[in-house]
Image (tube, rainbow, N blue to C red):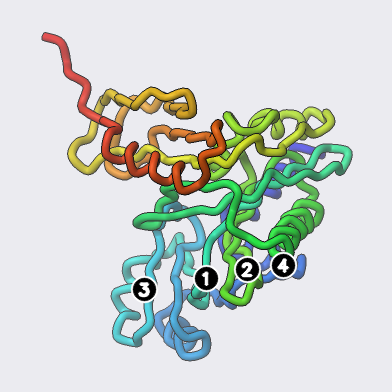
Amino acid sequence: EDVSKGSEMLRIAQNRLREKKTLVRLNIPVAPFQKITTEKELSLALKSLGELMLKTVTGGYDGKGQVRISKVEQIPEAFSTLYSTKTEIVAEQFVSFEREVSVIVARNRLGEISCIPIEENVHENNILTISRLPARLDSRVREQAQLLAKQIAEGLELVGVLAVEMFVLPDGKLMVNELAPRPHNSGHFTLNDCATSQFEQHLRAILGMNLGDMSIKSPTIMYNILGPATFQGEYNVLCPKKNNIFLKMYGKLESKPQRKIGHINIVDKDNSGMNELLNQVEDLKKNLVIEPKQTPY
């Protein structure tokens, strides 16, 4: 029974159209959307919804499989770029949001639910660059974000951890963008800033144990290490050493341009503040070295 529940969660999350229909059924706010299979349908969607973010129903990540359009003239190229007989398109109304946040929620077999503190995500070229914690949210929005995540966890009968990506709109309202039923990139800060990491929490949930303490110890920034554009292949990473900087490499044998190969957590151990953490991120960008591994002769 538990295995079938897990497979159903994957079935939903691996298909954007199915995911959005499920969220609507659970009364979760999402951007207006339409299923697209022809250029005519895309033209009608553009007319009714306005500016669109087009996404392949399956297979997209880190901005792949996505095209933004606002004019009729863009339709033929956008449609031919994304559509195939195996991959449908979902057209979402483009949402102008203030910031994106992630809520990682855990639920165990007994129905106990807990949320990891909400982090704020910053993207470059549609790839998550940093997650900053805590997110810049007032208490009302923070509570609403956690309520939505718990509502989704209960509605899907989650067992494990689930990342819920949300847009914070200028008026403070929230809109759910995507689900990821697993430990998530934006939650890696928990490895160095929480008594219970998201990985341990996931195991606790599926093993039927009580959920662990997820409160944060200090403000933290997680910085993703991406493969540089200058080469592809085996690599070495040289990272500045400080007592508040924690390097975690993923063991990927090859670096590829824009591929996530590790992350760095920068923890505010001495209460110097978020601005100082952001300054340390800028220093890291300058001093982190990713270079081709030299092959010995």
Type of the residue with mark 4: Ile
Q: Amino acid at mark 3?
A: Phe
- In front: mark 1 or mark 3? 1
Q: Secondary structure at mark 3?
A: helix
- Tell me whether circle 1 and circle 3 mark residues in contact (CB < 8 Å): no
Residue 95 coordinates in the image, percent (x, y): 51, 74
Q: Which mark is residue 79?
A: 3
Using the numbered discs, state the Cα–Cα distance from disc 2 to disc 1 in whole angstroms.
9 Å
Residue 282's spot in the image, x, y percent?
A: 34, 44
Q: Do the numbered discs 2 and 1 sit on residues whose CB atoms are within 8 Å? A: yes
Q: Nearer the viewer, mark 2 or mark 1?
A: 1
Find the distance from the CA under tag 3 to the CA under tag 2.
26 Å
How many other residues sit within 10 Å of disc 1, few (<14), some (14-19) or many (≥20)?
some
- Which residue is denoted by mark 1 in the rendering? 97
Q: Earlier in the sequence, mark 4 or mark 1?
A: 4
Q: Earlier in the sequence, mark 3 or mark 2?
A: 3
Locate the C terminus and report the quarter of the image it occupies: top left
